[in-house]
Image: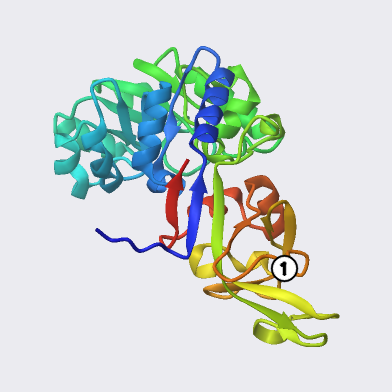
Amino acid sequence: MNSFVAPLRLRLDGDALLANWRWLAKRSGGAACGAAIKADGYGLGATEILHRLTSAGCRDFFVSNWAEAAALEPLMDDGLSLSVLHGVRVDDMATALASRARPVLSTPAQVARWKEAGGGACDIMVDTGMNRLGLDWRADVASLIEGLEIETLMSHLASADEDGPLSTAQLARFASLRPSVAARRFSLANSAGICLGSDYSFDLTRPGLALYGGVPRREGAGHLNQVVFPQAQILQRRRVPAGDSIGYNATHRVGADTEVAVINLGYADGYLRGFSGRGTACIDGAQLPVLGRVSMDLIAVDVTMARDVTEGDWLTMDYALDEAARTSGLSQYELLTGLGPRFDRIWH
């Protein structure tokens, strides 16, 4: 058995994950609330997230491709649904036809391919204004998909995290398809769409970011809980004399003697250079600023006020996603999915 302990870890709050899903489910009204667990559960571990959300009552899950589906399919019991958002390429057909997961068909070629192969239940993506994946809502969608066994007709909101006319337009366009398309369920709302209100919920919602502690709109503030807490171990504590600089290109020069902890974390782990001179760590309630540039594997933190902190101790990085996004200039999605494989992932 490998007893190696990495010098950096993600402390993952399972109770916060479930509380977030339950809040989103309540905001979804009468619609079922699913979960996007693509990109290995936004970097946190799709298998563990599926287990935990299933225990809370979630039954609908979404991944991006067939490799992700294959990793999760052995865990899917008869009451669970798994959809593959990127549809089915020629190369995917053998896998898709044998799988319990459903393709989300998004092009006329995919629709034709699935019909010709005698494929079973599927989902359909309609583009209502994002101009990404999906059948054009202005086309004769009903005729194009006639003859398919459609579980869910879905679309994706382009800017539900902002106040503007596009979400309202997309809602109207999507709703106009309902009378003519024989789908069992209709689904439009992502995390931000859930926050927009019950008109966007239809039969099924598909939150992603908000499950993991992201705050997609102001309505989620105070309700969505931080799930991810990056922690890194101190490799060295040192005194930097007044006038010396710290890190690459000497971007930070100390004005007084400063106690510095060098910790095992950097941009190779997803703690990116946007945190240079802006990020903070904490221990026992003390806020400890990052000094100088973030490098590949190391950062320096001012521990002058933390007298007892020493080599081998662990610091927790301030990483509440909405605030960390403002600090770093990165999106909340990048902050989550960029956390690298060198972290031990430890659920509590």
Instruction: Tell which of 259 and 33 is nearer to you.
Output: 259
Q: Is residue 6 above or below residue 346?
A: below
Which coloring applies here? rainbow
Q: Is residue 182 left or right of residue 194?
A: left
Q: Position of residue 91 (x, y in %)?
A: 19, 50
Q: Is residue 59 left or right of residue 117?
A: right
Residue on which the image places disc 1: 303
Q: Position of residue 93 (x, y in %)?
A: 18, 42
Instruction: Please indicate, yes or no, whether residue 85 appears anywhere in the rendered image.
Output: no
Instruction: Please indicate, yes or no, whether residue 117 appears anywhere in the rendered image.
Output: yes
Q: Position of residue 162 (x, y in %)?
A: 69, 38
Under mark 1, the amino acid is: Val
Q: Position of residue 251 (x, y in %)?
A: 74, 81
Tally of numbered discs:
1
Instruction: Tell which of 251 and 330 is nearer to you.
Output: 251
Q: Quadrant for the N terminus, please.
A: bottom left
Q: Say which quarter of the image contains residue 27.
A: top right
- The residue sitting at 77% across, 77% down in the picture is 258
Q: Say which quarter of the image contains residue 119.
A: top left
- The residue sitting at 40% across, 62% down in the picture is 5
Furthest toward the front, the residue is: 308
Q: Is residue 168 above or below residue 99?
A: above
- The residue sitting at 63% across, 47% down in the picture is 321
Instruction: Tell which of 180 and 11 is nearer to you.
Output: 11
The crowding category of the residue bearing disc 1, from other C-alpha atoms within 10 Å (few below 14, some 14 to 19, many at least 20), is many
Instruction: Tell which of 15 and 188 is nearer to you.
Output: 15
